[in-house]
Amino acid sequence: MSLKKVLEQAALKGVTEASARIFGNVFNPTGQRSPHNILKKKLIGEETSQYYPHDIRRDNPMWVARKEEERMEKLEMMKRRGKGPPKKGQGKRALKRSK
């Protein structure tokens, strides 16, 4: 190998190493697999659940009761209009089978 090639490679290695240090990348001159990609991923699981505050609405019985009450009122309105769910054994399938 000529001296020029050796100097070019050394300079290129120095530049890539400096670039990696400046931009916070991992310098890997051999190109071997490393666990760095796995380690730099965002945290999931326990760490994420600790970050977000606890949802108070889910545990509040008044909020849950109000939602259930609204659902029942809507269902009652639909039944009065004839759009509610059919009684057991009287749906579309049951009507098709009886013919």
Image (tube, rainbow, N blue to C red):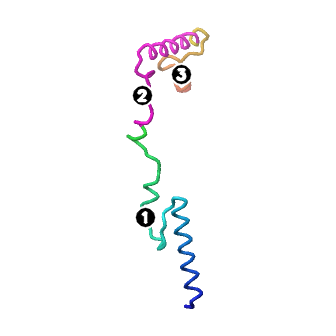
User: Label 1 belongs to which residue?
Assistant: 34
What's the residue at 55%, 59% (across, down)?
Answer: 23
Magenta stretch encompasses residue 64: yes
Amino acid type of disc 2? His
Q: Nearer the viewer, residue 25 or 73?
A: 25
Of helix, strand and loop, which one carries label 3? Answer: loop
Which residue is depicted at the point 58% across and 8% down? 80
Mark found first going from the N terminus, 1 or 3: 1
Q: Amino acid at mark 3?
A: Gly
- Residue furthest to the right in view is 81
Residue designated by label 3? 91
Give the numbered dot on residue 54: 2
Which amino acid type corresponds to the residue marked 1 in the rendered image? Ser
Upstream in sequence: badge 2 or badge 3: 2
In magenta segment, residue 89? no
Q: In which quadrant will I find the C terminus? A: top right
Label for residue 97?
none
Count neighbours of disc 2 (C-alpha within 10 A) and say few if under 14, some if 14 to 19, many if 20 or more: few
Give the magenta-colored segment's residue range. 49-77
- At x 53%, y 64%, the residue is 20
